């Protein structure tokens, strides 16, 4: 399955809104959403909060959302915050 959205750069306090708006726009379609994070260089606490918020919105709407192609930093961040099992597909893709 191809990614629905490919993110680049950073998902941090300065850029979280763009990520949120982009992914939330896909939710009404009702199709599974795969967010490719292979080109994301950094995620801060605001980015993690945004991931959780967008995931919760998708779930509430009956839409599956998974994050794929996690780099090592994001994979570790998902593990440390115990979010990996919640919304990560795997480190290499779906």
Image: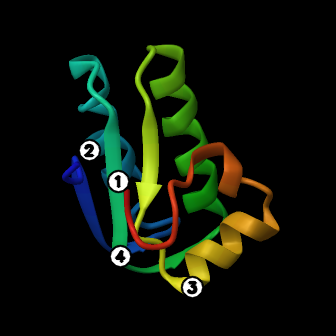
Q: Residues within 10 Å of mark 2 (few under 14, many from 20)?
A: few
Q: Earlier in the sequence, mark 4 or mark 2?
A: 2
Mark 1–mark 2 Cα distance, whole angstroms, equals: 10 Å
Q: Nearer the viewer, residue 40 or 63?
A: 63
As drawn, is 13 to the left or to the right of 69?
right
Q: Earlier in the sequence, mark 4 or mark 3?
A: 4
Pointer 1 with pointer 2, Cβ within 8 A: no
Q: Residues within 10 Å of mark 3 (few under 14, many from 20)?
A: few
Instruction: Give the number of the mark in front: 2 or 3.
Output: 3
Q: Nearer the viewer, residue 40 or 64?
A: 64
Mark 4–mark 3 Cα distance, whole angstroms, equals: 10 Å
Residue marked by disc 4: 38
Secondary structure at numbered mark 2: helix
Secondary structure at numbered mark 3: helix
Which residue is depicted at the point 55% across and 54% down?
88
Residue marked by disc 2: 22
Residue marked by disc 3: 72
Pointer 4 with pointer 3, Cβ within 8 A: no
Q: Position of residue 52 (x, y in %)?
A: 61, 43
Image quarter of residue 33: top left
Q: Earlier in the sequence, mark 1 or mark 2?
A: 2
Secondary structure at numbered mark 4: strand
Mark 1–mark 4 Cα distance, whole angstroms, equals: 9 Å
Q: Residues within 10 Å of mark 4 (few under 14, many from 20)?
A: many
Indicate whether 29 appears above or below 51: above
Q: Nearer the viewer, residue 67 or 10?
A: 67
Mark 2–mark 3 Cα distance, whole angstroms, equals: 24 Å
Instruction: Give the number of the mark in front: 4 or 2.
Output: 4
Residue 62, numbered label: none
Residue marked by disc 1: 35
Secondary structure at numbered mark 1: strand
Pointer 3 with pointer 1, Cβ within 8 A: no
């Amino acid at each position: 399955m191809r990614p629905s959205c490919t993110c680049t750069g950073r998902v941090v306090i300065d850029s979280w809104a763009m990520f949120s708006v982009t992914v939330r726009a896909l939710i009404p379609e009702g199709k599974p959403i795969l967010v490719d994070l292979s080109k994301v260089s950094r995620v801060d606490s605001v980015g993690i909060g945004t991931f959780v918020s967008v995931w919760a919105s998708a779930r509430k709407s009956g839409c599956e959302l998974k994050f794929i192609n996690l780099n090592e930093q994001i994979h570790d961040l998902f593990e440390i915050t115990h979010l990996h099992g919640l919304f990560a597909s795997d480190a290499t893709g779906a």
